[in-house]
Image (cartoon, rainbow, N blue to C red):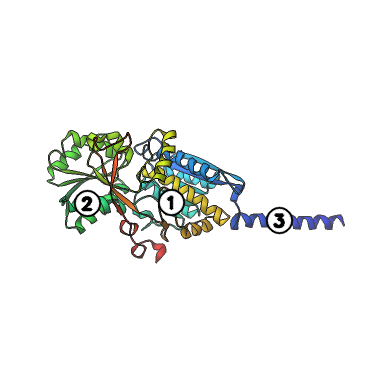
Amino acid sequence: MVKQWMKGLAGVAGVIGLSCSLNATAGGLSNDTVKIGVLSDMSGVYKALEGPGARLAAKMAIDDFGGTMMGKKIELISADHQNKADIGASIAREWIDSKNVDMIVGLDNSAVGLAVQGLASDKKTITMATGPATAALTEAQCSKYGIHYVYDTHALPVGTATAIVKNGGKKWFFITADYTFGHALQDSTSAVVKNLGGEVVGSVNAPLGTTDFSSYLLQAQASGADVVGLANAGQDTVNSIKQANQFRIVQSGQKLAGMLVFITDVKSMGLDIAKGLQFTTAFVWNQSDEAKKWSQRYYDQQGAMPTMVQAGVYSAVLHYLEAVKAAGTDNSDTVRKQLGEMTLNDFFVKDGKIVANGLMMHDMYLVKVKTPEESKSDWDLLEVVSRIPADQAYIPVSESACPLLK
C-alpha cells in the first residue's frame, strides 16, 4: 500500500515538474527572472555616445517600469565589447549559456552587432541593436530575433546628403572608418549622391581609433571635391572635424558632411568649430516637453544630455519589458511576436513599428548645429531643420533583401 502511494506521489511530482517545464517555455518567466544585458563600448572611441550612459538609460527604464516583472526582480548586467567582434560574441555566448540573459541591447559597433545578433539568433535570444548602423542587420544578415532600433546606414544619408547635394555639393570625397560600418555608410551615402546627379571623386580608409587624420585630409583637399564626407563616428568624427578646422578645409571652400554625428561630438568640438554642420539624427533632447523632462533626469545622473543611442536604449528596454508583460512570458518567440504587433510611443519615438525584418521604423530629423549666438544654454546646440518621415528614411519592407521575407 505504501509502495503504491509512493509511486502515485512520484507520478504527481512528475506531472508537476513537466508542467513547470512547459510553463517556462509557453508562459511565465524562464529562470524565474527577466535579465537584460547592455553590451557596449565602455572604454573606447564610442564610450561617450553609448557606453556607461547606455547602462544608466537601461536602469532608468527598468526603474520606471517598476523594477519587477510578475513579482520577480528585473536584473541588469553590462560589459565592454572593446569594439572587437570576437570579444562581443564571447560575452554574449556566456551571458546566454551561463547567465540566462533574455535580451541584449546596445552593440555600438557594426561588426560586433552582426556577430552578436547572429550568435544570439542561433540561441533564440532577442537582441535590440541601438548603437550599430549597418543596414545588414535587417537586410542580408537579418534575424528572426534581431531588432535594429535607432538608425541605420540607409536612413543617415537620406537627410544629410540630400540637403547638401541640393545646395550645390555635387562632388564628394570620403574619409571612411575601415570596417563594416564605415564602408556601409560610404556605400549608402554614395548611392544617394549619385541618384541626385552628384559624383564620388575618391575615398580613403582610416583605421578605427586613429588620432591623426592629416594625411587623409590632405588627400581630400587635393581631390577637388566640393564635400568631404566623414563616414565615421564618435571620437573619430570629433578628431577629423577638429583637424579639418586646423587645415582650414571649410575656409578654403570645401564642405564637411558628418554622416553620423552625436550631440556629445558637437559638445566636444564646441560651437565655434561645429557651427553650421548638418547631420541626421533620431532624437534631439529638447525636441518636446516629454523629451526635455526625461533628458533632464538623465542629465542629473550622467552630467551630459543623452545621445540618440542612449535615449534609444531606454526606449528599447522599456518596450521590451512592456512586451514581456503583455505576452505573459519571456519566451523569445512570443515576445518577438508581441513586439511586432505593438505601436511604440514614448519621448523617443512616436508611432514606431518593428517590421518583419526587425527594423524599427520611425521618423528621423535633419538638424543643424547652432552658432554660439543662437545657443540659449549649455546644451542648446541643435536646430531641427526638417522631419524625415519613416517611409522616406528607411528601406521599405517590400524592397528589403532580408532572406526571412522571401
**Measuring 57% from the left and 54% from the top, which residue is drawn there?**
329
Q: Nearer the viewer, residue 84 or 30?
A: 30
Q: Secondary structure at mark 1?
A: helix
Quadrant in which the C terminus is drawn:
bottom left
x and y percent of residue 281 in the render? 32, 47
Quarter of image, res 379: top left
Q: Tell me which numbered mark, 3 or 1, is placed earlier along the sequence.
A: 3
Q: Which residue is mark 3?
A: 16
Return the disc, 3 or 2, that comes first in the chain's sequence. 3
Mark 2: amino acid = Ala
Distance from Cα at disc 3 to Cα at disc 1: 35 Å
Name the amino acid, label 3.
Ile
Residue 32 place in picture, x, y as percent: 61, 47
Q: Secondary structure at mark 3?
A: helix
Q: Are marks 1 and 2 in contact (CB under 8 Å)?
A: no
Of labels 1 and 2, earlier in sequence is 1
Pick the residue in front: 372 or 93.
372
Horizontal placement of 145 versus 326: left or right?
A: left
User: Would residue 185 be found to the left or right of residue 19 on screen?
Assistant: left
Question: Is residue 5 at least partly visible in the picture?
Answer: yes
Residue hosting label 2: 163
Residue at (61, 45) in percent of width and height: 72
Q: CA distance from mark 1 to mark 2?
A: 33 Å
Instruction: Please give the label number shown on residue 117.
Output: 1
Residue 228: percent from the left, percent from the top?
19, 45
